[in-house]
Image: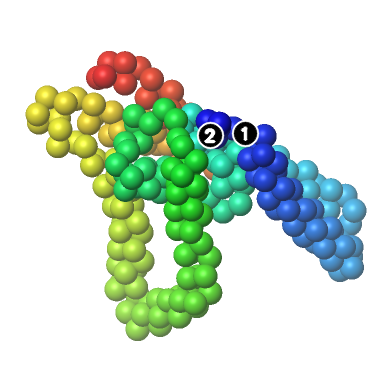
Amino acid sequence: MQFNVNHPVLFLLAGIIVLVVLAQSVWFLRKAWKRGMEIGMPMGKLKRIVIGTAVFTIAPATAIVISVISLSKKLGIPLPWMRLSVVGAITYETPAAANALSAMGLEWAKVTSLSATEYVTVASVMTAGIMVGIWLVPVVGKKLISGMINLEKRDKKWGEIFSASMFLGMISAFLGYVFCNFAGVFRGELSGLIPPLVMLVSALMMGLCALALKKLGWRWMNDYALPISLIAGMASAIPITAWLG
């Protein structure tokens, strides 16, 4: 029997995990509501907080849905749905899946179907890789933050430089993924321009959102700038790919 990345059993397994996450959210919501009542917060204020929080979760949820759709063509719906409902992010899941396929001699852009072995390998790499951050934060996070605070106390300028360097290092890792095929442009392979141009469109859209926030006072843009930039970048990829091939 041919393996199916959208098999009902996979939907069932992913659904169980998502339900556990939702149950945790409901449990913490009830605990927070109960604590609010204990400290004397007015009922009206509690309702406004819940409604406001629910409204502003639409923006990040939109980005997650877009990410699930973008990954579903290669990996099906259950795996991206489960991964991005727990602790995943599109900026991690795609490179992790692509690296796993590359190790098996496959190319992410050319994959149309996966065998059971390939699927399990990709899922294992995506899951095991992201778990490093879960245990690494409590192990080194406190010491790292304490060291940065002490550095800023001794020399504020160098503390700021260190923080900026860490941020730029993280951005550089993703930029490497964007420009990894750019050298092919010099050999006439214009497809290497597609990721940089898509990134440029997303960056320009993010800049326009920042201008709208600053000049027009649209504070809601804080929460919707990311999904707007994602949608603009993904939409631009279609004509850019058609143009450059």
Task: Say whether marks 1 and 2 touch (CB < 8 Å).
Answer: yes
Q: Residue at x 70, y 41 (%)?
A: 12
Q: Position of residue 180 (x, y in %)?
A: 23, 42
Q: Is residue 219 above or below residue 92?
A: above
Farthest-out residue, left: 187
Q: Is residue 92 above or below residue 10?
A: below
> Callout 2: helix, strand or loop?
loop
According to the image, label 1 marks what residue? 7
- How dense is the environment of label 1, judged by Cα within 10 Å: few (below 14), some, or many (20 and up)? few
Q: Position of residue 159 (x, y in %)?
A: 34, 73
Q: Residue at x 50, y 41 (%)?
A: 116
Q: Position of residue 202 (x, y in %)?
A: 39, 33
Question: Of the numbered discs in the image, which one, if any, rests on residue 3?
Answer: 2
Q: Position of residue 22 (x, y in %)?
A: 74, 50
Q: Amino acid at mark 1?
A: His
Question: Of the numbered discs in the image, which one, if any, rests on residue 240?
Answer: none
Q: Is residue 62 visible?
A: no
Q: Amino acid at mark 2?
A: Phe
Q: Nearer the viewer, residue 117 or 178?
A: 117
Q: Residue at x 46, y 76 (%)?
A: 140
> Callout 1: helix, strand or loop?
loop
Q: Is residue 245 visible?
A: yes
- Which tag is nearer the camera, tag 1 or tag 2? 2
Q: Quadrant of the N terminus?
A: top right
